[in-house]
Image (spheres, rainbow, N blue to C red):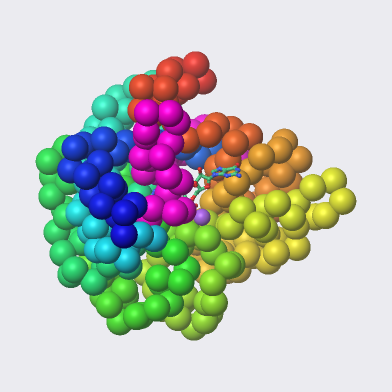
Amino acid sequence: HEIIRQLRTAFQANLLQVWYQPQVHLQTNEVSGVEALLRWPGEVGFIQSPSVFIPLAEYSGLIVEMGDWVLDEACRAYQELQHLPNAPKRVAVNISMPQFRTGTLSKSVNQSLLKYKLAPNVLELEITESIAMDEPEIVRSCLSALRTIGVDISIDDFGTGYSSLGQLHALPIDSLKIDKSFVDDIDEEKSGLYVELIIGLAQRLGLSTVAEGVETKTQAHRLKELGCTIAQGYYYAKPMPLHELKRWLEARA
Ligand code: G
Ligand code: G
Ligand code: MN
Ligand code: NA
């Protein structure tokens, strides 16, 4: 595949970037964390959207090396951010299924934490709902090892996959990320029934909630009313390079 070849070349030439999107605590309005998101810049704008090249990287196996790099880069960035006024309390990194299958994910996590002298609880790993439910044995033992290290685990795109509630309950997780499609369902006319149900479920399971794709004040207000913990979306900020994030944090401090 031509795109895979180009992606590998770009990765080896160190051309990929990690951008960061702020997450805001709904009760206090403080910056609670940032999500690390991979970007492939080209001469004119972006070459490909991650929703196109991440699946190709997963298919080709390249995601294992790339994922280790994103993890390390996010830890390096957090080391720079942690002393700033208004510093986020954690950085979230997306993890793909092939990274679980290697059996060395917890080793990679440990290495990066040690390298940058970070406390484990500053790192949050996001896995999609479908990963969490696929190959439950591999995922559960890997998540347990990660939990032992002390990193937080969240379920990404929650509500879009097929969760067995029994399996969800058995997984060592800390939070649910409410998919944008449910957040979109909160506006002047619609109250967001599914968002309400997911928050209720999370609360009963002792998990926190992160709403994704929050674009309006109405949505933010309603999410806060419903007891959602954290919000992330264009209403607060788009994903941005590290140097811009530093300025954004400074301006809010
Ligand atoms: O940044 P954007 O919203 O365009 O991301 C699109 C998709 O790509 C999302 O599902 C996001 O989780 C995924 N993605 C972005 N960066 C990474 C990454 O570093 N690793 C993995 N596995 N997925 C990522
Ligand atoms: O699947 P995951 O949640 O990891 O990916 C997040 C994706 O959603 C990223 O590609 C990010 O750029 C995108 N995103 C974040 N906030 C918003 C938003 O408010 N609106 C839209 N349309 N996309 C968003
Ligand atoms: Mn995510
Ligand atoms: Na998501």
Q: Which residues are magenta?
A: 26-54
Q: Which residue does the image show at 74% across and 55% down from the upper left?
A: 185
Q: Is residue 112 left or right of residue 93?
A: left
Report if residue 110 lies within the magenta region: no
Residue 152 in view of the camera = no
* Residue situated in front as seen by the camera: 216 or 207: 216
**From what the image shows, is residue 243 above or below residue 160?**
above
Where on the picture, by quarter, is residue 35?
A: top left
Residue 110 in view of the camera = yes
Q: Position of residue 92 (x, y in %)?
A: 38, 47
Q: Which residue does the image show at 47% across and 22% down from the upper left?
A: 248
* Residue situated in front as seen by the camera: 203 or 5: 5
**From what the image shows, is residue 40 above or below residue 133?**
above
For the N terminus, the image quarter is bottom left
Q: Position of residue 146 (x, y in %)?
A: 25, 62
* Residue situated in front as seen by the camera: 168 or 127: 127
Q: Which residue does the image show at 45% across and 46% down from the upper left?
A: 49
**From what the image shows, is residue 202 above or below residue 40?**
below
Q: Which residue does the image show at 79% across and 47% down from the upper left?
A: 187
Q: Position of residue 168 (x, y in %)?
A: 47, 75
Q: Is residue 226 left or right of residue 132?
A: right
How many discs mark residues in the rendered view?
A: 0
